[in-house]
Image (cartoon, rainbow, N blue to C red):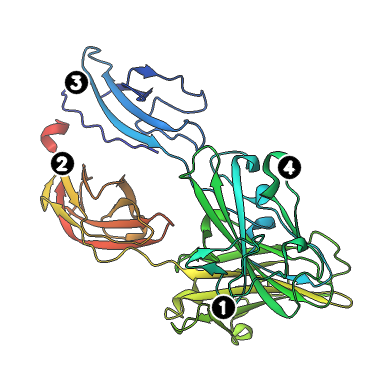
């Protein structure tokens, strides 16, 4: 999405014609491309949907022509680079990170089928090479030799961190001939029961070895037969995967759904549980403690506690700011057994340590104001800066500009009719959509009467 501010210094008709063009800048920006008819190119702004432009550098050029004086033409350009999005590796359906599994059942992990490439309509599993690792969760690290991880099918032994499997004959690769390891089957009784195992897949793109991805799955093995339950976020873009956690912004609700796709007899009951996580620094895992106040906040903080869909509002996070880890577990009860699944969340921290300033502190609607927002830090990286303004009521705030860089110029609307004061808020957003709001001191912006006349 690209927006523009057009200032007309003209004492005749203000009617104008606007036209956007897009050029491929692989070498020089001379190759204009044909724009899809669904994209409007005659407004002061242009919106280009995802997956429209191939990877590369593009010039988006806006040309403005005065109707009353066709020779009066002005143009400005913005340059945009389209890059590859990282894939989301999923070992099971929906990207579920914790499942209960029956001891006497096959365990199938299929990242070649269930992983997601946001840049494509479907994931091409044959484009990737796969390597699997496993550890006994909460007791041992992944088996390794001098820090180099040992794959699950490797016969080498780490005496301090035992393998999940006694030998490699207890697993089978079941992918296609062109990508045999894209799917793996752990045979029945291969994993001792009453333990939790963590599987990890490391994926490398065959065409570009710099493209890698790592996915995780926790499997609780039970003696009884346990149908697999899968959980996912209703709005996937609000849940960004971070190793064996999903990132959640503290101001965002968590909306989840669950399914039981295979071998599910009559479901007797569904119950959701919430756990708080604690990391004491001396353990390699998070210690989970059940949140025992769910009954107090049902239909207030929690909705759908006994249904397949569950929502926890942001009040859960805002009222427990000291808790960094949360687990949402669903339990399905059947005639003779139960099964559960869970998603683990870590609170995404907003950008910190920065400030914002504006120069000058007063001006007119034709003044170019410079916004400077230095020193903002976020471990996920800063995505962009958005500028909002309002005069009196903050609920009427509107976005004026956004920028991928911390220094940018903007034209501002006139302030309050009486005082000409205008209030400014800068939203600093990280790459996982967590936002810090920075409130600036009001400045004075008057209408440029001379420009209007």
Which of the two residues, 365 or 384, is positioned nearer the viewer here?
384
SS for tag 4?
loop
Q: Nearer the viewer, mark 4 or mark 2?
A: 4
Question: What residue is at 66 percent from the left and 72 percent from the top?
Answer: 197
* Residue position marked by numbered label 1 in the rendering: 160
**Measuring 31% from the left and 60% from the top, which residue is drawn there?**
393
**Looking at this view, is 441 or 333 the one in front?**
333
In the displayed structure, does residue 8 sit left or right of residue 18? left
Which mark is nearer the camera, 3 or 4?
A: 4
Alpha carbon distance from label 4 to label 2: 60 Å
The residue under label 4 is 176
Inter-mark Cα distance, 3 to 4: 70 Å
**Residue 419 appears in view:** no
Check disc 3 and report its element: helix, strand or loop: loop
- 393 left or right of 211 in image: left
- Nearest-to-viewer mark from 4 and 1: 1
Pick whichever of labels 3 and 4 is earlier in the sequence: 3
Per the rendering, the mark at residue 368 is 2
Sequence-earlier tag: 4 or 1: 1
Q: Examine the image and state in which quarter residue 157 appears.
A: bottom right
Q: Quadrant of residue 100?
A: bottom right
Report x, y in % for residue 416.
21, 53
Q: Are marks 1 and 2 in contact (CB under 8 Å)?
A: no
Q: Quadrant of the N terminus?
A: top left
**Distance Cα–Cα, label 3 vs label 1:** 83 Å
Q: Which mark is residue 12?
A: 3
Label 3 vs label 1, nearer the camera: 1
Sequence-first disc among 3 and 1: 3
Q: Is residue 378 left or right of residue 221?
A: left
Which of disc 2 and disc 1 is earlier in sequence? 1
């Amino acid at each position: 999405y690209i927006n523009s501010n057009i200032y007309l210094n003209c004492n005749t008709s203000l009617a104008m014609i606007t036209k956007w063009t897009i050029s491929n800048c692989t070498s020089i920006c001379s190759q204009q491309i044909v724009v899809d008819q669904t994209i409007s190119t005659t407004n002061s702004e242009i919106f280009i949907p995802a997956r429209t432009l191939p990877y590369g550098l593009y010039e988006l050029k806006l040309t403005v022509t005065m109707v009353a004086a066709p020779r009066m033409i002005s143009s400005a350009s913005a340059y945009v680079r389209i890059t590859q999005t990282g894939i989301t590796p999923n070992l099971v359906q929906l990207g579920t990170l914790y499942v209960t599994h029956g001891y006497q059942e096959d365990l199938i992990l299929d990242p070649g089928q269930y992983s997601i490439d946001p840049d494509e309509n479907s994931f091409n599993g044959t484009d990737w090479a796969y390597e699997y690792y496993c550890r006994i969760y909460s007791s041992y690290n992944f088996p390794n030799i001098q820090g180099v991880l040992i794959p699950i099918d490797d016969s080498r032994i780490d005496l301090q961190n035992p393998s999940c499997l006694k030998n490699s004959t207890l697993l089978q690769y079941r992918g296609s001939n062109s990508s045999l390891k894209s799917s793996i089957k752990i045979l029945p009784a291969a994993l001792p029961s009453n333990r939790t195992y963590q599987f990890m897949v490391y994926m490398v793109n065959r065409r570009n070895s710099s493209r890698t991805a790592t996915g995780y799955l926790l499997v609780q093995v039970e003696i009884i037969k346990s149908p697999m339950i899968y959980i996912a976020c209703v709005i996937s873009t609000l849940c960004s995967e971070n190793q064996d956690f999903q990132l959640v912004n503290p101001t965002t609700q968590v909306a989840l759904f669950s399914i039981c796709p295979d071998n599910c007899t009559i479901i007797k009951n569904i119950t959701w549980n919430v756990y708080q996580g604690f990391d004491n620094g001396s353990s390699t895992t998070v210690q989970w403690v059940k949140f025992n106040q769910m009954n107090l906040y049902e239909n207030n903080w929690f909705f759908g506690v006994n249904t397949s869909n569950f929502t926890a509002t942001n009040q859960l996070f805002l009222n427990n700011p000291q808790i960094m880890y949360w687990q949402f577990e669903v339990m399905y009860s059947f005639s003779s057994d139960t099964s559960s699944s869970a998603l683990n969340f870590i609170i995404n921290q907003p950008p910190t340590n920065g400030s914002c300033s504006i120069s000058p502190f007063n001006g007119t609607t034709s003044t170019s104001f410079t916004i400077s927002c230095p020193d903002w830090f976020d471990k996920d990286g800063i995505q962009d800066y958005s500028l909002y303004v309002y005069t009196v009521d903050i609920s009427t705030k509107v976005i004026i500009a956004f920028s991928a860089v911390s220094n940018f110029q903007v034209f501002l609307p006139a302030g309050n009719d009486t005082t000409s004061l205008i209030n400014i808020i800068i939203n600093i957003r990280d790459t996982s959509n967590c936002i810090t709001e920075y409130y600036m001191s009001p400045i004075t912006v008057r209408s440029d009467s001379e420009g209007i006349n």
